[in-house]
Image (cartoon, rainbow, N blue to C red):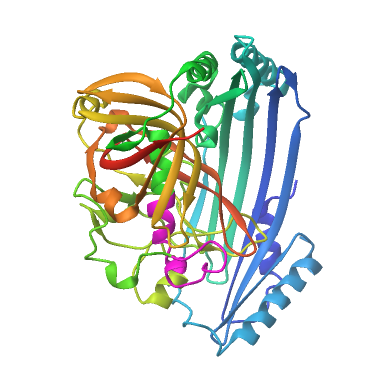
Amino acid sequence: MTLPADIAARFAAVAPACDFWSVRVMRSRAEYLAVTRGVAEPVALSDDFGVMVTVHAGGGLGYAATSDISAAGLTRAGRAALEWAQRSAGRMVAPLPPRSTNTIHHDHEDRPRIAWDAVSRAEKFVRLKAQSEELKRDDRIADWSTDLSFTDEDSVLVTSSGDFIRQRRGIVVPGLSASASVDGETQTRTFGRGGVIRQGGLDVLDDVGFWTAAPRVADEALELLAAPNCPTGEMDLLLAPDQMYIQIHESIGHPLELDRILGDERNYAGTSFVTLDMFGSYQYGSPLLNITFDPGVVGEAASYAFDDDGTRAERQFLIRDGILQKPLGGAFSQARANTSGVANARACNWNRPAIDRMANLNLEPGSASFEDLVSGVENGITMETNVSWSIDDSRNKFQFGCERARLIKNGKLGPVVKNPNYRGISATFWRNLKGLGNAASVQVLGTPTCGKGEPNQAIRVGHSAPPAVFADVHVFGGG
């Protein structure tokens, strides 16, 4: 079998004469298994293998991608990248960032406790069908499904400076869904609605409680059918981690992307209310708000040692004690903006260039237990599991809907309510953060399909967060 490292070595032999070149080789093999209403779906398999060549020449930058990994194909890609670099020379929006003089050699493969293929595909289907039977525990469950996806990703970055960076990892995304229906009304409960994503193997499914979650998911779907609608009003809002992660993603992560702040995404994914002069002084949230860029968290969806430009990744505060510190900008965007950033130049695949992307963006925990958070709320509501979101094109005003909520009265959890929603403005919302769960309450979550860039790049992002309480939030019901 041809390995990414072999392809990188093959390109080095035919690389064009230029100031600098890099070749990024990626192989991604994926497997998707699903059981829908008790019936096994056809297995979906993919094996994607290709190369991205980047060239610096005369102050210009060019790149070209190919799936032709023969010597002739790699030669053509190198020549095409060189031609683009020559055309862009003298027309770049900023000088290319200087390259490190330190040669890097990094070869790492994450080895899970239990490999994905330690259990046969047939046995995986047996277990998924058992989960499916647990979901169909009542005649009112009208639609139900369970699924697993696994991706084995192997990437190698080699440069003309002698760098060799290999990173291999597995990514697991489990799913459960139960929809209960009666008298024309349907309520759906899921296992995180795609937010449960980890690096690892079959061990992930035990760690996140996947194999025991089906009865709870089905029971809560039935419970929602009988629940009253969410009330409307201003109140304290306690968000569970599986809603916090998308709140962080949309109203902190995307606004802090440096290329977006510089205007690159305005005609597609929007701009940002954040401006360059805010860094170092802007009060993004209350003093409880501490957001870290941390690609070193074991098992989180976007953990890595080096980004796709070869920059070493390190834990850094983006927001500390509520004050905005750094943007999410890789080396090229940092050179454009003349500011510091982080190692987050990332590409979703071999046929896309690296751009500024979120990686592991985490909310640091506080000191309160979940029970402490509830006891501090006189009139409020707790919400779980995102179901819908809407945010303006500057990533400022937002509205989110959740699957499930419970009222809180006088420090005690009350009845379940359905169709809960809330809305706010980023600055006001985060400055009203008044309570954070402790380290024991943190959940590691994320998304496998964050979209950005033209052509589009869907990439995985990790978020860990505790539950959090916000004061004076506008809450309302839907239907």
Residue at 53%, 84% (x, y): give it: 92
Q: Height in image: 259 above or below 91?
A: above
Residue 139 image position (x, y, % from top left):
64, 10
Residue 186 visible to the viewer: yes
**Residue 18 figure quarter:** bottom right
- Judged left or right of residue 342, residue 13 is right
Residue at 38%, 31% (x, y): give it: 383
Q: Height in image: 33 above or below 324?
A: above
471, 263: nearer the viewer: 471
Judged from this view, the residue extending furthest toward the bottom is 90
The magenta segment? 250-271
**Residue 358 figure quarter:** bottom left
- Judged left or right of residue 128, residue 109 is left
- Judged left or right of residue 390, residue 139 is right
Residue 102 visible to the viewer: no
Residue at 33%, 71% (x, y): give it: 276
Residue 254 image position (x, y, % from top left):
44, 57
